[in-house]
């Protein structure tokens, strides 16, 4: 009997000792990050012996996976909101408002109309033009700085992710080595370290896990790409830019770069890396493109209208802004040696969308021009254009949608070579004034009209309009009409007029109403680049004249056209649009839309972030309720196991006493 008691007591002491050790370990690791509480269980007593205790981690795989998913989503929105809120605040500040600079410029244009010959009034316009460029450069600088911050953080996060991936792979090997052995139960630290590394990785990118052989965990990105595979094989992240080295893209390098890198679908990526990429693609890239688009559209429209006027020196107007020419980025896979640059074709700034372009050679002198969105996806259909004399423009590609671009090419490219043109994103910070002379502002019209004092009819000649100063109607040195004054006389025949200038005299019949008279007169008058109307009923012999506006410095007719640009819908909204859609906005409407879009996207992210934060807290609470250490519970177990241990020890003492008594009786 004493032997049975001795065996039972010894077994109980050992079993309770194991229970106390497990409880003590849980209590000691209550503040250890990633620690999963453990439990020791024993089999039913057999042959007076308590079975060897089995210690295992209390973990729910489903709760763990859900926590990792919610952690990725929360980290995504936390990172996105942190970055987006900064840009939203900067763009919302009145001191940074591009609309204020635009309004100030055109307000001073309006003021100059009252005193078109005033140098002071003109100087204010030029000063505001310079301020507008500086404001645009400042806003562009904000976006550019944020891009640099994003690139730096992406590099840091990619390195952190690579370290974690390698750690997980190493831990998988160590776990596989003890899996199924007696040492497995003592290797809980390896499992905890691996689970913690997986959770930390889920903060950077969204991942999914699968159970592999020998206790391994196989890791996959949420987009499907493999990260950690069987037998310790793993892929690492890399941040590279092709063709733009400053536009980092996420790839997976297979076997340390020994194979072709895998492209990652960043549109559905979560975690901090996904949040940074989404912030860049959804806020920074559109903001930079729209700023550049507005600047180019305004500069081109202002230049083209100014060139249709006469400046303060009596010369034909010129450019006020210098529109930049930017280099296109060649893809690394190109096999040719071509170099490509792009700018806005004069007069086509309103056709430029807020997008980048992929230009692909389809033949030696033929390319496809494809607009792309902020994620690099095609917008609409590609346009096929011909290269003539190293230039792609509307002159050698009539009727082809070129999106307002003028592309210059040098060198030879092979079929399939591609270039990326980022005109908009580079333009906002490179716009400059072409001149700082107040006299360069062309407020006057270069033509003026008059009714003969002896006219007897009720007709009047209109002030005239100028559509081109390069079509042949003007000469620049000295500035004058190429064919001298134009004289129009009403003949006795119905709707018939005679027209006279240095090119001769001819008679023509109009189709009422008497509009665009030079166009109705035909060649060569229809190529002069200016025209006029006859309003009212002329009498036979009534004469009307048009001449160069020499000395007309108090004229503000072209200035009125410049002022009208403020309300002109000159900023293109979409690449693809129906013929009846309103696809253009004013400068102020476009900028207001940009600021609104940034605010809306940021607020939506805040709302979604709050929701996922709540989900993450719920998942954390659920996970901790299963795997976290509860000190109250462990303290209760400690008392219970201590009492059980003391009881078993008392049984052991009793068994020893009985055994000693038996020995004494036998002596």
Image (spheres, rainbow, N blue to C red):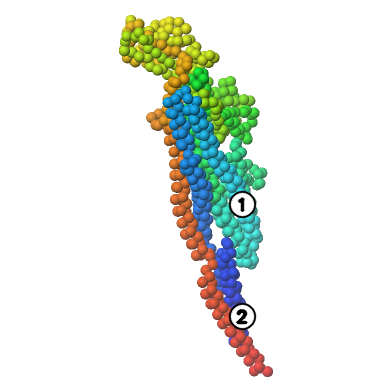
SS under mark 1: helix
Give left or right: position of 219 versus 560: right
- Exactly how many numbered labels are in the figure? 2
What is the crowding at mark 1: few (fewer than 14 residues within 10 Å), some, or many (at least 20)?
some
The percent position of residue 313, horizontal first and vertical second, equals 51, 20
Q: Is residue 239 left or right of residue 524?
A: right
Residue located at (43% from left, 16% from top): 448
Q: Residues within 10 Å of mark 2 (few under 14, many from 20)?
A: some
In the image, which disc is placed on residue 160?
Answer: 1
**Camera-nearest residue between 631 and 362:** 631
Q: Residue at x 55, y 53 (%)?
A: 203
Image quadrant assignment for residue 11 = bottom right
578 vs 315: above or below: below
Q: Determine whether the residue tagged by mark 2 lies in a helix, strand or loop.
A: helix
Mark linked to residue 10: 2
Q: Is residue 197 visible?
A: yes
Q: Nearer the viewer, residue 565 or 243?
A: 565
Residue 115 in the image, given as x and y percentages of width and height: 44, 25
The alpha-carbon separation of the residues under discs 2 and 1 comes to: 51 Å
Q: Residue 178: x percent and y percent?
A: 64, 62
Q: Is residue 402 visible?
A: no
Give the residue drawn at x 44%, y 21%. 554
Where residue 288 sits in the image (x, y, percent)? Answer: 52, 38
Quarter holding the C terminus is: bottom right
């Amino acid at each position: 009997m004493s032997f049975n008691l001795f065996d039972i007591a010894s077994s109980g002491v050992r079993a309770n000792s194991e229970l106390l050790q497990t409880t003590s370990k849980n209590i000691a690791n209550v503040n250890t990050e990633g620690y999963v509480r453990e439990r020791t269980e024993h089999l039913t007593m057999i042959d007076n012996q308590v079975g060897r205790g089995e210690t295992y981690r209390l973990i729910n795989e489903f709760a763990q996976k859900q926590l990792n998913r919610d952690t990725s989503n929360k980290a995504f929105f936390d990172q996105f909101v942190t970055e987006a809120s900064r840009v939203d605040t900067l763009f919302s500040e009145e001191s940074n408002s591009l609309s204020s600079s635009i309004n100030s410029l055109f307000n001073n244009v309006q003021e100059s109309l009252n005193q078109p010959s005033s140098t002071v009034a003109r100087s204010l316009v030029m000063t505001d033009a310079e301020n507008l460029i500086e404001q645009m450069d400042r806003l562009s600088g904000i976006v550019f700085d944020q891009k640099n911050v994003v690139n730096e953080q992406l590099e840091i996060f990619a390195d952190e992710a690579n370290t974690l991936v390698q750690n997980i792979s190493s831990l998988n090997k160590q776990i596989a080595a003890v899996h199924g052995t007696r040492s497995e139960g003592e290797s809980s630290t390896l499992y905890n370290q691996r689970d913690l590394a997986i959770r930390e990785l889920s903060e950077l990118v969204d991942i999914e896990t699968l159970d592999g052989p020998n206790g391994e965990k196989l890791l996959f990105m949420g987009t499907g790409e493999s990260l950690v595979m069987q037998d310790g094989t793993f892929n690492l992240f890399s941040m590279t830019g092709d063709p733009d080295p400053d536009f980092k893209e996420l790839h997976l390098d297979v076997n340390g770069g020994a194979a072709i890198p895998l492209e990652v679908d960043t549109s559905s990526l979560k975690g901090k890396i996904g949040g940074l990429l989404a912030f860049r693609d959804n806020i920074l890239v559109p903001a930079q493109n729209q700023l550049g688009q507005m600047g180019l559209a305004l500069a081109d429209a202002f230049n083209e209208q100014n060139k249709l006027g006469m400046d303060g020196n009596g010369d034909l107007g010129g450019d006020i802004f210098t529109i930049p020419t930017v280099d296109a980025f060649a893809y690394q896979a190109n096999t040719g040696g071509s170099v490509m640059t792009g700018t806005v074709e004069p007069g086509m700034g309103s056709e430029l969308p807020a997008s980048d372009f992929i230009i692909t050679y389809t033949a030696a002198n033929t390319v496809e021009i494809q607009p792309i969105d902020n994620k690099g996806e095609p917008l609409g259909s590609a346009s096929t254009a011909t290269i003539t004399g190293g230039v792609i423009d509307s002159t050698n590609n009539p009727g082809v949608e070129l999106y307002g671009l003028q592309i210059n090419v040098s060198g030879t490219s092979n079929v399939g070579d591609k270039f990326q043109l980022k005109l908009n994103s580079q333009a906002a910070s490179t716009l400059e004034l072409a001149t700082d002379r107040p006299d360069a502002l062309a407020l006057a019209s270069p033509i003026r009209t008059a009714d003969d004092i002896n006219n007897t009819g009720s007709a009047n000649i209109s002030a005239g309009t100028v559509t081109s100063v390069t079509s042949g109607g003007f000469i620049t040195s000295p500035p004058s009409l190429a064919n001298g004054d134009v004289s129009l006389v009403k003949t006795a025949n119905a709707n018939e007029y005679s027209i006279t200038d240095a090119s001769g005299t001819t008679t023509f019949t109009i189709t009422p109403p008497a509009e665009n008279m030079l166009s109705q007169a035909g060649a060569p008058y229809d190529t002069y680049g200016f025209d006029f109307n006859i309003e009212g009923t002329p009498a036979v012999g009534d004469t009307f004249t048009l001449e160069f506006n020499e000395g007309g410095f108090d004229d503000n007719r072209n200035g009125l056209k410049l002022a009208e640009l403020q309300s002109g819908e000159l900023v293109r909204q979409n690449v693809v649009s129906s013929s009846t859609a309103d696809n253009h906005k004013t400068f102020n409407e476009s900028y207001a839309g940009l600021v609104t879009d940034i605010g809306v996207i940021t607020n939506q992210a805040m709302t979604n972030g709050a929701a996922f934060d709540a989900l993450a807290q719920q998942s954390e609470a659920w996970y901790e309720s299963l795997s976290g250490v509860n000190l109250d519970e462990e303290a209760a177990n400690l008392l219970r196991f201590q009492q059980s241990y003391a009881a078993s020890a008392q049984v052991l003492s009793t068994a020893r006493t009985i055994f000693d008594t038996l020995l004494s009786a036998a002596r």
